[in-house]
Image (spheres, rainbow, N blue to C red):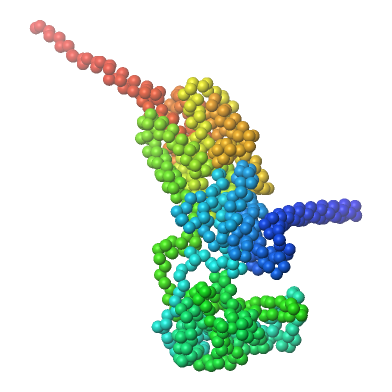
Amino acid sequence: MKPHRFSFRSLLRSWGNGLVMLLALTLCAAQVQAKAYEVEQQRIEQFFPEADSISEPQGDYQVRTLTKGDEVLGYAFQSIHVTDIPAYSGKPINMQVLLDPQGTIVDAYVLEHHEPILLIGIPEQKLHDFNAKYAGIKANQRVVVGRSGDANAVTIDAVTGATVTVMVVNEIVMRAAHDVAVSLGLIEANASARAKPATVREDVYQPASWAELTGNGAIRRLRLTNGQINEAFKGTEAEGVDEAPAEEIDETFIDLYVAQLDPPTIGRNLLGDSQFRFLQEELKPGEHAIAVLGSGEYSFKGSGYVRGGIFDRVQLRQFGNIISFRDLDFQRLNDVYAEGMPDFSEMAIFIIREQAGFDPGTPWTLELLVRRQTGPTSGMFTSFELPYQMPEDYIERPQPTAEELAAIEEANRPMWLNIWYQKSFQIGVIVAALLLLTVILFLQDKFTQKPHFLHWLRRGYLVFTVVFIGWYALGQLSVVNVLTFVHALFQDFRWELFLSDPVIFIIWTFTAGSILLWGRGVFCGWLCPFGALQELINEASRKLKIPQYELPFAVHERLWAIKYIVLLVLFGISLESMSMAEQAAEVEPFKTAITLKFDRQWWFVAYAVFLLVINIFTRKVYCRYVCPLGAALAIPTKLRLFDWLKRRKECGNPCQLCAKECEIQAIHPDGHINANECHYCLDCQMTYHNENKCPPLVNKNKRKKRDKKAPAEPALIPVVQVVEP
């Protein structure tokens, strides 16, 4: 029994610890939610101080309505309920957006983000300052980050070092604001996102029965039972009010049909020739007519058809706009002539006026509002939708102009593709530079035979890498990119995450290919902006005759392991928390020296400067011993397909010239080149082809010259002795 008692207590203790941890996690989550809600409330109170009521989140987009008495002051919502576009971190940014009743943005504020450049690097206040620029922008305007050739677009300056992040923020704010404003009927859908309105083909007519018109979608139906109505009000104040008894729940509450009367095939078959002709004469240019037919215990007309009234039970919605009908928009419909039509208790024609901006070729919805009285002056509505789409045979769509096609294409393009268009100059220059580097690598034997030219070509390329790729295009790769890619492979891989920064994507793609062909050295020796900066500084120090120091090879070889240990530590941290790993990745000075151009807190700048100062006396110390990115690239270098760097049998024994001249000590004393440490500067290959420098070549040439100068041995002439007889 003793062991059993011990196990039972242990089990209780484990349960208790689990409950304590669960409670702690629940409290932490509650505190985070409470803090977020507090921020939401503060922003609402700051911009709408007169609001005395904030509704609960409503609708698909969870929109809160801000009111003062019966007056609507504005709306508040979180972008995460509208769109979940992944940002640079791979996770969406959640923002609270405030709109006024005219569809103008009042405030856009970041509630949550996981962007590494903002977690450590750029002060978050810069992002808030960027978001403040959206105040006063209409939700249907086009906003571009940076320069734009569109004179009608609103341009906002990017945040230096976080261009991709703010471009994602721009997409989130404007897309969310537009979708919500359209859904609330505050604005029309962007005209640039849709073509011109279609026109009804008046030359198309075919006799058709009721069954044929309902069969091809020209007439649409909505049937509701008493049970469906009861279910719609369940859980509300109107539950139980005027409910049908259980035995009547399957009976028809309303059987509703709707049809657009403009096309002759629909209008003439329903109304007859004379009534259809009269309707056409009544309609003004830009106006349209629909027929609504109903039966059942519920009237779609309600009490709003009296003179001066508004029909409060039916309305039409298109492009997010609500079209209501007044008594002047209503015509009685007494006779319908379609063969095989059922009997209806009420029928009506409603006119859609020109100012509604109705498009007969675009889907629209007839909304049926059902109201239950909950008090002497109060009631509750619920709505049911009857969608309608005109058959394509009855309409003609105008061909859009080239400008309209371009606008439609841009509106429908994914965000990452728009970023590629905006960065086309950077992409073009970098692709050209990578093509040049590819030529150098494939023709390296030719280039290394001209060492003076190749030295200056390489120096120019390194300057380009630092200035253009690094400081201008912000194309500095990081170990964070490696960790993000590895995690994406096992979690939620999406190409959009990596395509959102075209410069990084292109360099990563080239680096992956170059590793298979040449190893990690191509990136580390040619394309890493911080590595290029170190190399140029060290070149200058050597020109100034500053003493250089190298570690003994045995010590140097063991220090290689440090960068692999750093990589393993960062990877282990990332398994627990990617945010913590991004902070620990500050062991890389890239963000300070390249991305932010030393515009940062002093301790980060001091660390980067310290590494550059050491580099004055010993070439690329950080790259050789500390860089986790270099370690990550060295691992797949084992898979490289070719060995392009040539060696001779004399290399290492007895010749040690290349090993001594290799400024990062990637050549072992035995003469072989360690591809995991080589930065592919091609210095050893220039020596390999230099007949005046490479000892084996020098000795070979000396032997050739000596052999040419040595006199030829005289030919032996046989001596013939003559003997006298």
Q: Where's residue 115, x and y in %?
A: 61, 49
Residue 170 occupies quadrant: bottom right
Left/right placement of residue 168 relative to residue 77 reads left
At x 44%, y 30%, the residue is 683
Instruction: Identify the residue shown where x is 61% and y is 38%.
Output: 600
As drawn, 45 above or below 578: below
Q: In the shown orientation, is residue 13 left or right of residue 525?
A: right
Nearest the viewer among 654 and 117 is 117
x, y percentage for residue 274? 46, 92
Classify the position of the C terminus by image quarter. Answer: top left
Q: Residue at x 54, y 23 (%)?
A: 549
Q: Residue furthest right?
A: 1
Q: Residue furthest left?
A: 725
What percent of the width, then of the height, locates residue 257?
57, 84
Residue 198 lies in quadrant: bottom left
| Residue ranking furthest to the top | 724
**Residue 15 image position (x, y, % from top left):** 82, 55
Query: Which sits in the foreground, 105 or 612?
Result: 105
Q: Nearer the viewer, residue 568 or 500?
A: 500
User: Does any portion of residue 25 appear in the rendered image?
Assistant: no
Q: Is residue 206 above or below residue 421?
A: below
Q: In this picture, is 717 found above or below 437?
A: above
How many tags in the picture?
0
